[in-house]
Image (tube, rainbow, N blue to C red):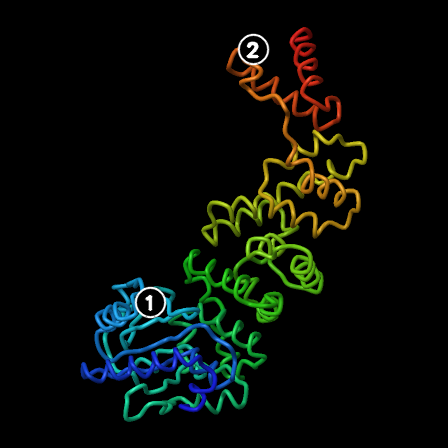
């Protein structure tokens, strides 16, 4: 492994690893490179994460290392971890630990331990390897679970039969790694995954949402992981209406090819066409709030009345009033997914032009024209904007005339 480290990591990072290993040894600690970093080095895949494991007080050690490099340290005292930036790399230092679960789906309770026990708690064999960074044994690979063999066989294998029971988020991670690495979930692992799929119900909404977010944000082609999740029944365990198919693949591809494919846009497309009841149910299950909730419910609400946009005679002001209440991602998802060219044309007009329309006159201008603040002022401003949208006024002077005429008739 020493040669792999030398060849695949920048010189300054290699120097950092050697120096950190020496510092740990001088404090009678042992420091290891662990997990996904080791896996990616063995696969010769690029990675900007440096995951370190210390048999000792990782937080105290990280404080010393970060101070030496003049970097700001973020500490997670509960889990005995800390992280900081090293150029383009994210360095995470954790205390070697064992874990116990009070009940399935709960966050684990952690206890300081040894590197072997720490690797025993890992999710999959390919993530349960470590590299010794001690000066005398720098680069020595520790592989207690056959991870190297599974890398060669391109298999995702859990370490023990209760793995998915202890933490069902591993179901999602198994799918992500399988699809990202072009591996295969090992036969017995897949059998246990399917057997314990109902353990997804033990995952909190926040943790479940995070797993979906990781698929949508971190994976280059998230539709591949979603298709596999659908095939295994994972999506249906979240909500019976969730599904992945060729149509969704094409929608994701269009989102990537022509727009900024954010996780929220992907999720809006995933939930497109499910109806308001299912949107509400999914929002509740995933404990959605803020923008994500508005987007999911927005897609459902737009679709409930999509016939309004299918009317070729609809005015620009009506398009504006109908769509302005919804988040852009919800509107864009409906544009991408709609099969109606009329609807697409109306939405495109809103996104490119109508939403940016403004009147030349503002509230202060109207007050100077003698209009008092309050509901009448807001009503006039709304009517004036509608007139601007529909082309009834084109400049400031025409707006003044419109306001005077409006006042005379109301």
What is the quadrant of residue 38 in the picture?
Answer: bottom left
- Of 185 and 193, nearer the camera is 185
Image spot of residue 158 (x, y percent):
44, 81
Image spot of residue 387 (x, y percent):
70, 23
- Of 380 and 149, nearer the camera is 380
Q: Is residue 105 left or right of residue 315?
A: left
Image spot of residue 112 (x, y percent):
23, 75
What is the quadrant of residue 382 in the picture?
Answer: top right
Position of 34 relative to 90 (above/below): below
Asked whether the beta carbons under mark 1 and mark 2 sit within 8 Å of each other, the answer is: no
Q: Residues within 10 Å of mark 2 (few under 14, many from 20)?
A: some
Residue at which label 1 appears: 83
Location of the N terminus by quadrant is bottom left
Q: Name the residue at 31% across, 69% down.
A: 101
Q: Secondary structure at mark 2?
A: loop
Location of the C terminus by quadrant is top right
Q: Secondary structure at mark 1?
A: strand
Image spot of residue 300 (x, y percent):
62, 45
Q: Is residue 325 left or right of residue 77?
A: right
The alpha-carbon separation of the residues under discs 1 and 2 comes to 59 Å
Q: Residue furthest top?
A: 408
Q: Is residue 71 left or right of residue 173?
A: left
Per the rendering, the mark at residue 136 is none
Q: Name the residue at 31% across, 65% down.
A: 71
Residue at which label 2 appears: 371
């Amino acid at each position: 492994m020493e040669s792999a480290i030398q060849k695949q990591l920048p010189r300054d990072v290699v120097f950092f690893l050697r120096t950190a290993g020496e510092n740990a040894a001088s404090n009678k600690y042992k420091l290891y490179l662990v997990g996904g970093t080791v896996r990616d080095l063995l696969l010769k895949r690029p990675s900007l994460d440096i995951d370190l494991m210390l048999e000792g007080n990782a937080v105290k050690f990280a404080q010393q290392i970060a101070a030496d490099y003049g970097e700001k340290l973020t500490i997670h005292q509960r889990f005995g971890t800390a992280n900081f930036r090293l150029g383009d790399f994210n360095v995470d230092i954790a205390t070697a630990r064992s874990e116990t679960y009070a009940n399935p789906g709960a966050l684990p309770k952690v206890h300081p331990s040894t590197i072997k026990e720490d690797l025993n708690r890992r999710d999959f064999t390919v993530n349960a390897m470590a590299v010794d960074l001690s000066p005398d044994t720098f680069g020595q690979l520790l592989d207690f679970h056959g991870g190297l063999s599974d890398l060669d066989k391109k298999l995702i294998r859990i370490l023990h039969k209760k793995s998915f029971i202890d933490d069902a988020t591993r179901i999602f991670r198994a799918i992500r790694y399988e699809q990202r690495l072009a591996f295969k979930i090992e036969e017995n692992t897949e059998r246990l995954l399917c057997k314990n799929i109902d353990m997804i119900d033990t995952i909190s909404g926040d943790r479940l949402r995070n797993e979906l977010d990781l698929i949508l944000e971190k994976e280059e082609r998230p539709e591949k992981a979603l298709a596999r999740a659908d095939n295994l029944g994972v999506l249906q365990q979240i909500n019976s209406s969730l599904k992945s198919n060729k149509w969704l693949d094409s929608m994701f591809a269009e989102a990537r090819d022509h727009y900024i494919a954010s996780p929220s846009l992907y999720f809006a497309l995933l939930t497109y066409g499910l109806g308001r009841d299912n949107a509400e149910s999914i929002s509740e299950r995933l404990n959605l709030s803020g923008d994500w909730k508005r987007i999911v419910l927005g897609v459902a609400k737009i679709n409930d009345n999509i016939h309004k946009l299918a009317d070729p005679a609809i005015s620009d002001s009506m398009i504006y009033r109908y769509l302005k209440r919804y988040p852009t991602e919800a509107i864009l998802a409906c544009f991408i997914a709609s099969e109606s060219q009329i609807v697409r044309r109306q939405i495109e007009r809103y996104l490119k032009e109508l939403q940016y329309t403004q009147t030349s006159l503002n509230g202060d201008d109207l007050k100077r024209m003698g209009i008092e603040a309050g509901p009448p002022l807001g009503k006039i401003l709304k009517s004036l904007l509608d007139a601007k949208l529909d082309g009834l006024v084109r400049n400031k002077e025409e707006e003044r005339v419109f306001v005077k005429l409006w006042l005379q008739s109301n």
